[in-house]
Each structure stands twice: as structure tokens, then as C-alpha cells.
Amino acid sequence: MSQDLVFGLYIFALATFVGYQVISRVPPLLHTPLMSGTNAISGISLVASLVVAGEHHDRFAAVLGFIAVTAASINVVGGFMITDRMLRMFNKKKAPALAKAGS
Amino acid sequence: MRESLINLAYLVASVLFILCLRGLSSPEQGRRGILLGELGMLIAVVATLFKAEIVSFEWIIAGAILGSLIGTAISLKIPMTQMPERIALSHAFGGLATSLVGIAEFHRMRDMADAAATVVAVAASEHALNRLTMGSLGFEVFLGSLTFTGSLMAFGKLQGFITGAPVTWKGQNVMNFAAFAGVIGLLVYQVIFLTAAPQWMFFTMCAVGFSLGVLAVLPIGGADMPVVISLLNSYAGLAACATGFALRSNILIISGALDGSSGLLLSILMSKAMNRSFANVLFGAFGTGGGAAAALPVGQAAKGYNEATVEDAAAVLTASQSVIVVPGYGMAVSQAQHAVRDLATALEKRGTEVKYAIHPVAGRMPGHMNVLLAEANISYDALFDLEMINDDFARTDAVIVVGANDVVNPGAKTDAASPIFGMPVFNVEQARSVIVLKRSMNTGFSGVDNELFYMPNTMMVLGDAKKTLISLFGAVKGDGH
């Protein structure tokens, strides 16, 4: 068994554990932003796509890399933007109507 | 030195990603969290551009600009009711990216191995493509392809391009399992024989991944989409993880694990909220199309129900001190969230307390209803989860059910023969009166009839939910002024 595999599994196991701990604290209220947020983060495959698109192996690899960069950028840019757009909408406010009703 | 600095930057980015998710534990910190996530991504991308392997930038720039434009356009334009569709599409993009990276890497490594074989033979080829790389690439491409087509199918079902009802045929599950076993067999062979294995094996694996994505989602009904979307989320994460193993990139492993565990956690929550196992969701083909469930509505159509007019419903509402709104997918379909808010505001002006009961699987994705109500400017401290509000129904004067069906079906508690028996549901029937806004008396997605509609304290107001709500608003506002 290669060292790389064992090393990778270490990171994987610990990251999964941290992920599970952090994510189990997200209230159901925010499950949609959670999903689009993790989706933006998993757009990190952009870094792998960048290498493929930039390493100049041959035309076939470059085209695949180009499509991969495009798809991953859509997720990164779109994912963060829409998560922010959603979070902006979650407001806690005293409904003005309620205040009036009391008077 | 350069490599170490890049890796340090990746470490910083990974920590920022974890902080980003931590921010999502409350709406107040959420936006700051997202800012940290964006910063992490920026650091990771800039660091990557310094990698020695990257020699040309034209494809990168073209792809990044195109992708950013499309991403921005989608996120600015898309209405909140379409969030499940957008999430499904973004899983498809994520799957596509990982799958293509895997194919390109495989292609490059085989070329390198072939070139080396003519010169120094075996040792060099071992270097280019070892067992760990081959195995991870296999998983990456298979999972990526499956996520891509599976998510496109989910998107199609949500959009209505493809029927939301389960599509089934005989031997379906056996066929899918056989294809999956075949992929594992091919992958094992390639891991053992490496470059001695013919290349068609790898591309067959891709092809099976693409087809399995379609085949696996076809038999799953529209109402099960929250689970499917969560599962695809975790597949996309696992595919990114496999990329990390193949490229020895820790940041990919960490981010993939974060995405994977979030998807897994959500799928578990969703399955629990429907009282069904994963296996049942994935292979059960639940929903309209099952003979017994389809036969039910015919037999029960003759049962009497109280059809009420808007005026009747408004009279009940104006006489109520406390009201709970139960939204469902129907609210999203008729885009009625703003009309709900108007009605609630009018009621609150009269001194009525209005709360919202949100079931975990209401809508087509986790948290769907919360986002819609937040969009309509409803304060999030008026939104309550199943456990938090279920005891309040007995003390409530009126419940308004807006396009929800299965989550308010008392049969889930009492009727052991019901397909949704055991699913946790709202105790709406305990309220003094229940107003159900529904398009028609047809059964919902699951094809299960709902006892609630025939109860004496239930008033059925048939018609488009949004129109009904607007007239209700008019009637409530006009009353007593």
C-alpha cells in the first residue's frame, strides 16, 4: 500500500469528520444556502481544471481542460454569488404590522 | 520552495472553507462566512496559477471568463422558486468538470507512459501511472460522469422536461447493478495491469457512468428529489475527493470531503424526514405508477369533502387568534410566497399571530420553503421546524395549507397500509379548522390520497393557490374597516 494513499486517507478522514461536525450545526433554515455554498466550495476542482487547461499537453487535453475550467468557474462564481443573494434575504425583523396591532 | 508556498496557500484556503461553512450556522454570520469562502477560493486559484505545470494561459482565461459570465448571469436572473433546478444544474457542472479532468489526466498519463515505454520501458511508466492514480482516476471519472447525467436528469424532472413520475421497467435494478459491477470489474483489471490494460476499458467506464446517471434517476419520483439532490451533492464531493487522490492534492481531498459530508448529512436528514431508507428511495420507484396507490383515488373520489368559498375561508381567518401556514411545493409552483406574506401581514394587523410550519422535505430540495419565505421578506424567527411546532397545532385556531399534501397527511400516523406510513407529519388536523388551498382534488406526487381533505373541520378551497391567497387577502383586509 503506497504512502500517498495512507496520507490521503488521513486527510480525507479528518476532513470528513470536521465537515460533519461543522455541517451538523447548520439549522434546517439554511439548508439551501448550505447546499449552494458547499457547491461553490467543491468548485475547487477548478484548480485541477486550471492545470489541465494550462499544461499544454495536446489539443484534446486542452479542450477538455477549457470545458472543465468553464464548468468549474460557473460553480465557483455562481455558487458564491447566489448563496450570498439568498443569505441577504434572511432577515430578522419585527414585523411593522405586529407593532401597530399592539397599539 | 515554490511548491511549498503553493501548498501553504492551499492550507490557508482549506481553513477558510471550513470557516465559511461554520458561518452558515446562523443567518447573521452567513454572509461573512461566504466572504471567507470567496477569499479562500481566490487564494487557491491565484496560487495554482503559479504552478510550474501551467505554461499557457489562453484556454484558462477563455474558460474562466466564459464560466464567470454564465455563473453571474444564472445567479442574478434565476428566481428563488427555481433554486432546486439551479442546484441540480450546478451539480451537473461540478460532475462534468471532475469527469473531464479525469479523462484528460488519464489521456496525458497514458501518452507519457507510451512515450517512456519506447525508451526506458517499465520503470518510467510505473512513474506516470501507478495503482493509486489509476484507481482514483477511475472513481473520479465514473462518479463525475454519473453525477453529470444524473443531475441533468434531476434538472429535467424538476423542469418538467421529463415526467416527474418514476419510469420503471422489469429488471431495471438488476440491470443497473450489473452495469455497476461491470465498472468495478473494469477498474480492478486496470488497477492491476495499469498501462497493459487496453484504453477502451477506461472509456467504457466513462460511458457506463454517463448512462447509469440517467438510468438511476429515471425510476425516482419527483417528490423524492430532495434526497436525490442531496445524494448527487455528495457524489460530486466524492468525485472531487478522488481527483485529490489522483493528483495528490490535499485541498481537493479536503473540499471534496466537506462537500461529500454535507451531501451525506442532508440525504440522511431527508430520508429520515420521509421515514424511508436510502435503498427504498433509490430503488423503490415510489410514487404514482404503483398499482395500489393509483387505484386509491378512484375509490375515494366519491367521499364527501367541504368545498369552501374564499369568503367562508376569510370568515374563519378573521375570527382566528392564531394561524399557522404550512407551505409545500404547490406554493413554489404558483409562486405564491408574496401572496402568503400579504395575507399574513393583513392578519397580523388585526392582531392575529401567524407562524409558519416548515417540513424538512417540503418542496424539492432541503430548505426550499425557507428560502422562498425569506425572499418574501418574512422574518425567519416566524419559521418553525417540525419538532418545534407540532404541539402547537392543537392550540391553533386555523391552519392554512398552501400546496402541501403528504406532509399534512394524517394517514402517515394511522394507516399502516399507506405508502407513507411512519413519515413524520404535521398534526394539522388537531387545529380548530384547516383551510386547504389546492389546485384540484387530485392526489399529490406520491399518488397517496389524503384523509385530511375529508375531515369535518377541513375546508377545501380549490383553485390556483396564488389567486386564492390574493382574494383572501382582499377579503381579510376589507373586513372590519
Image (tube, coloured by chain):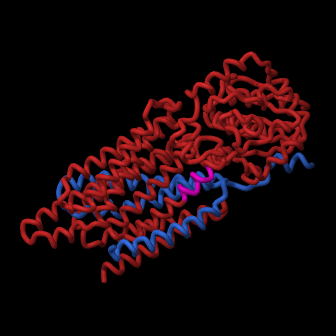
Chain colours: A blue, B red
Q: Residue at x 7, y 69 (%)?
A: B119
Q: Residue B138, relative to residue B292: is it above or below?
A: below
Does B265 lie within the magenta span? Answer: yes
Judge from the rendering whether residue B104 lies leftward or rightward of residue B88; answer left or right: left
Q: Is residue B333 rendered to the left or right of residue B354?
A: left
Name the residue furthest left. Answer: B119
Q: Please say whether residue B365 is one of the residues in the magenta stretch.
A: no
Residue A76: x percent and y percent? 44, 57
Location of the N terminus of chain B (image quadrant): bottom left
Drawn side of residue B90 relative to residue B443, left or right: left
Residue visible at 51% across and 40% down in the picture: B283
Foreground pick, B240 / B303: B303
* Residue nearer the viewer, A57 or A5: A5
Give the x, y percent position of residue B219: 49, 35
Percent position of residue B435, x then y: 80, 31
Residue B168 place in picture, x, y as percent: 47, 31
Q: Residue furthest top?
A: B302
Q: Is residue B161 visible?
A: no
Residue at the location (66% across, 47% down)?
A: B273
Which corner quadrant holds the C terminus of chain B?
top right
Which residue is at a point 65% across and 63% down the rendered structure image? Answer: A25
Counting every numbered tag in the picture gives 0
Q: Magenta region: which residues?
A: B262-270
Residue B10 shows up from this direction = yes
Q: Nearer the viewer, residue B274 or B178?
A: B178
Q: Main secondary structure of the magenta part?
A: helix
Q: Quadrant of residue B249?
A: bottom left
Residue B440 in the figure: left or right of residue A9: right
